[in-house]
Amino acid sequence: MRKIGLFATLALGLAGCSNEPESAFTLYQGTQTSANTRVHVATFDSASGETANRANCELVRDLLKSQPGRIIPFWCEKGRFSAK
């Protein structure tokens, strides 16, 4: 019975992931000390696909950038996290 519950939990978790290999978008932020630093904030990879992932990433980016006094840059890139 435990195996069925574990399988169901894993299946539900995977159902939320997109089947499109490059549909994910990642939100990054810079730092005040280095223009070349990329800090991972979030990865958007819903089953809704690329358009929804991009829109959600850009929405969160815009909300973070709109905070008063915020000078740290935020940006979205297509794909999963990369330290590049």
Image: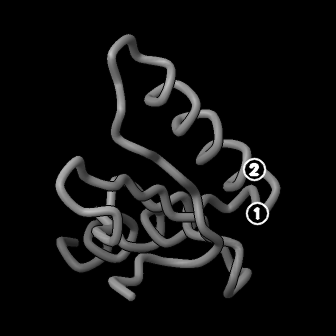
Colouring scheme applied when the structure was drawn: one colour
Along the line of sight, which residue is nearer the eye, 4 or 33? Answer: 33
Identify residue for label 2.
Answer: 52
Q: Amino acid at mark 1?
A: Gly
Which residue is rendered at x = 33% and y = 16% of the image?
69
Disc 1 packing (10 Å; few <14; some 14–19; many ≥20)? some
Q: Which structural element holds mark 1?
A: loop
State yes or no: discs 1 and 2 in contact (Cβ < 8 Å). yes
Q: Residues within 10 Å of mark 2 (few under 14, many from 20)?
A: some
Circle 1 residue: 49
Residue 19 location in percent, x, y? 69, 80
Vertical comparison of 83 with 35: above or below: below
Image location (x, y in percent) of residue 64: 44, 29
- Classify the position of the C terminus by image quarter: bottom left
Q: Quadrant of the N terminus?
A: bottom left
| Residue toward you, 27 or 33 | 33
